[in-house]
Image: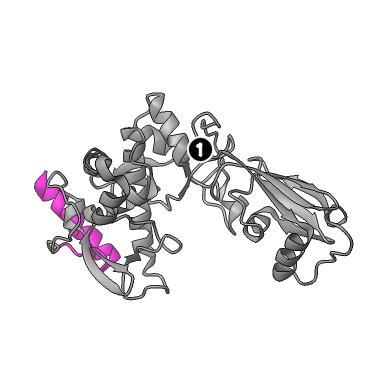
């Protein structure tokens, strides 16, 4: 068994190149566990501010799961998060480094890669809960050691978001292309178990005008907001597809960006004074819903079943 695992890792290195360094890494300052056999033998270069650090996949995953999902979530949900993150890491490694950090595999900037919470920052954030929370995260990484979601034998782009409004979005509803495993599926979270599941944002007429013209100077915004806003169309997942504004059809995802809305699942109410958005859920809506995963775990689903729920047609196996 040990020879087979070693051979598989060497093959991975040959296929994907130097991003998979199999020599033992110098331990980082963050927590590592001797329980893993795969993750601790993969070394990544991580850009943290201006500094590039060498870190085992195990250490990086622990920091990312700390940063991306509440440690109070069900253990099976944390395991699903760990395996989704690992899948995302292997997928991105196969595509090469990003232009934002050509000197590193990943970075700690959540707007570019994944959120990362160091051990020191976790101690400050979690205070007296640090030991039990950190133990849960470490266990989630160890219990899924080396495991990823695969589609046609390759690690998937396992994107995720905070919460959905009954259904996740298909990749093509949000981005330029579809992926077969990122289809729209039902998601069981609700206002009862998601903080700020519903949110309301109101803009004055002048605030709305400035934001819209900054993005689209060509819009015709004479008069009051009730004259600017027209028909709203939705896609199959209940998210806004387009909004008629100032004579143009603007995609719901862009409206979300322009007005900094929590999701593209919203309603619009405009009058002479301004415009109000009522929003459900948080995030782009594609892939695994974290609060949905937590609810599925509460209902008895395993981490493998959670991944198979949100990523259509995948199998679970070694990277």
304 relative to 43 in the view: left or right: right
Residue 182 visible, this angle: yes
Q: Name the colouring of the figure.
A: one colour
Q: Nearer the viewer, residue 159 or 230?
A: 230
Would you place residue 3 above or below residue 112 in this image? above
Residue 153 visible, this angle: no
Image quarter of the N terminus: top left
Tell me where residue 232 appears, x and y as whole percent. Answer: 77, 47
Tell me the crowding category of disc 1: few under 14, some 14 to 19, or many 20 or more residues within 10 angstroms, Cα based.
Answer: few
**Residue at point 79%, 58% (across, down):** 205
The quarter of the picture where residue 42 lies is bottom left
67 relative to 133 in the view: left or right: right
Q: Nearer the viewer, residue 186 or 54?
A: 54
Would you place residue 297 above or below residue 230 in this image? above
215 relative to 223 in the view: left or right: left
273 relative to 192 in the view: left or right: right
**Residue at point 17%, 46% (across, down):** 36
Whether residue 7 appears in magenta in the rendering, the answer is yes
Would you place residue 10 above or below residue 186 in this image? below
Tell me where residue 146 appears, x and y as whole percent. Answer: 24, 47
Tell me where residue 279 appears, x and y as whole percent. Answer: 64, 43
The part of the chain drawn in magenta is 1-22
For the image shown, how many numbered marks are present on the structure?
A: 1
Tell me where residue 306 appears, x and y as whole percent. Answer: 40, 35
Whether residue 318 appears in magenta in the rendering, the answer is no
**Residue at point 73%, 59% (across, down):** 250
Please name the predominant secondary structure of the magenta segment in the image: helix
The quarter of the picture where residue 28 lies is bottom left
Q: Which residue is mark 1?
A: 195
Q: Please, what secondary structure does the residue beneath circle 1 have?
A: loop
């Amino acid at each position: 068994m040990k020879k087979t695992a070693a051979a598989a890792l060497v093959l991975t290195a040959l296929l994907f190149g130097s991003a998979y360094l199999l020599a033992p890494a110098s331990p980082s300052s963050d927590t590592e566990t001797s329980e893993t056999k795969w993750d601790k033998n993969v070394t990544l270069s991580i850009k943290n501010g201006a500094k590039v650090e060498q870190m085992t996949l195990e250490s990086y995953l622990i920091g990312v799961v700390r940063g991306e999902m509440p440690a109070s979530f069900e253990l099976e949900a944390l395991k699903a998060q760990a395996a989704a993150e690992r899948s995302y890491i292997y997928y991105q490694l196969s595509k090469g480094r990003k232009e934002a950090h050509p000197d590193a595999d990943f970075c700690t900037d959540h707007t570019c890669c994944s959120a990362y919470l160091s051990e020191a920052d976790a101690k400050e954030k979690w205070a007296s809960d640090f030991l039990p929370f950190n133990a849960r995260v470490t266990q989630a990484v160890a219990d899924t050691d080396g495991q990823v979601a695969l589609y046609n034998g390759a690690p998937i782009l396992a994107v995720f978001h905070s919460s959905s409004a009954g259904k996740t979005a298909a990749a093509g509803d949000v981005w330029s292309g579809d992926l077969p495993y990122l289809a729209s599926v039902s998601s069981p979270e609700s206002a009862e178990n998601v903080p700020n599941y519903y949110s309301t944002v109101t803009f004055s007429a002048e605030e709305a005008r400035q934001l819209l013209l900054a993005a689209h100077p060509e819009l015709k915004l004479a008069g009051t907001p009730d004259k600017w806003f027209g028909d709203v169309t939705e896609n199959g997942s209940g998210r806004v597809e387009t909004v008629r504004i100032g004579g143009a059809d603007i995609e719901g995802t862009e409206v979300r960006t322009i007005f900094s809305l929590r999701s593209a699942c919203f309603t619009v109410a405009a009058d002479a004074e301004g415009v109000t958005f009522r929003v459900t859920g948080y995030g782009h809506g594609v892939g695994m819903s974290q609060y949905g995963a937590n609810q599925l775990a509460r209902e008895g689903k395993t981490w493998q079943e959670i991944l198979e729920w949100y990523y259509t047609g995948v199998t679970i196996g070694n990277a």
